[in-house]
Each structure stands twice: as C-alpha cells, then as structure tokens.
Amino acid sequence: MEQEQKAQWKQLMKSMDFFKPFQDEELEDLLKICALRKYQFNEFVVKESKPGYIFFIIMRGSVDIIKEDSKGLRRRLASLKAGDCFGEMSFLLNEPRSATVLAGKECFLFEVDLKVEELKLETQVKIFRQFAITLSKRLKVSNLK
C-alpha cells in the first residue's frame, strides 16, 4: 500500500469507533501488518462452518450476515456497515465460522489475522477491548429482542 493510500485509510480509521482508542503510531502499525481487501457485490467473504483465523473491520460498504437452514434456505441475520466488525468469534475461539458473510455492495474490508500478536502489548489490549465492547453491545441488543 502506498504512503498516500495509507494516510487516507488512517484518516478513515480515526473516524471509526473501533479505532478511537488507538494512537497514530498504533494505527500505522496496524496498517503495516493487516490487509485491506476489496470485495464485489454478493461475493463471499466467509462461509459458514469453514475455519476462520481472520476478523474483519468494514472500512467502506456493507456486508450481510447469512445463516442457511437445514433446507438450504438463506436467512439474513444482520447487515453491517462501515465501522462495524465481524469474525471476532472465530478469531478468538479458534472455531469454524458460525455464519456466511456476503458483500452487500462493493466494500473494502480491513483483515486482521494472527499477526496481531506481533503488535505491542498495549495495542493488542486495545484490540481485544474493542472486541469485548462489540460483543457486549451485540449481546445487549440480542437480549432486548
């Protein structure tokens, strides 16, 4: 990724809740070790029951979380937008994906893998705290239904 592109993505990251606790240097470190990938409309990002060691942060666009029933019918569980993350359960628990994720429209996803362990401990703690916040918010919403 070119320096100019990195600067643009860093500015976008600063505007997202997930990255609010991070200092500039930490964002730069993340940009060095993580991939930014473009997905086309309806392209599979992850498939249910497949192994998963990457979590994703939506930088631009949206994704749909899909669950397939025993008859093969797809049901949309949620739609996520820029700033949201997904895949943290598989990443943290080292378990297969619990749902399928499709690009809802063209999107750019920040892919974080096990290289996160190469980051400074303080940065790692911030990432895992953001996971905890995300999971807590989802659980709260789920409990209200």
Image: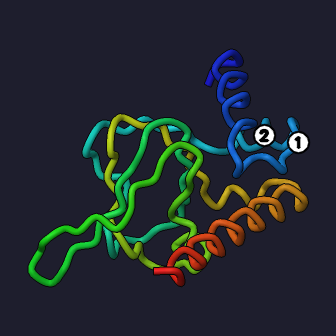
Q: For the C terminus, which image quadrant?
A: bottom left
Q: Which amino acid does label 1 sit on?
A: Gln
Residue 10 sits above or below residue 87 on the image: above
Q: Residue 27 carries which label?
A: 2
Q: In this view, does 119 lie to the left or right of 105?
A: right
Q: Outermost residue toward the top? A: 4
Q: Quadrant of residue 85?
A: bottom right
What's the amino acid at mark 2? Answer: Leu
Quarter of the image for the N terminus: give it.
Answer: top right
Label 1, residues with CA under 10 Å away: few <14, some 14-19, many ≥20: few
Camera-nearest residue between 56 and 105: 105
Q: Disc 1 designates what residue? A: 23
Do tag 1 and tag 2 residues touch (Cβ < 8 Å)? Answer: yes
Where is residue 93? Give x, y as percent.
58, 80
> In the image, residue 114 lies at what x, y percent?
64, 61
Q: Residue placed at 28% from the left, 39% from the top? A: 41
Please report the residue visible at 54 percent of the width from the left and 74 percent of the height from the top. 141
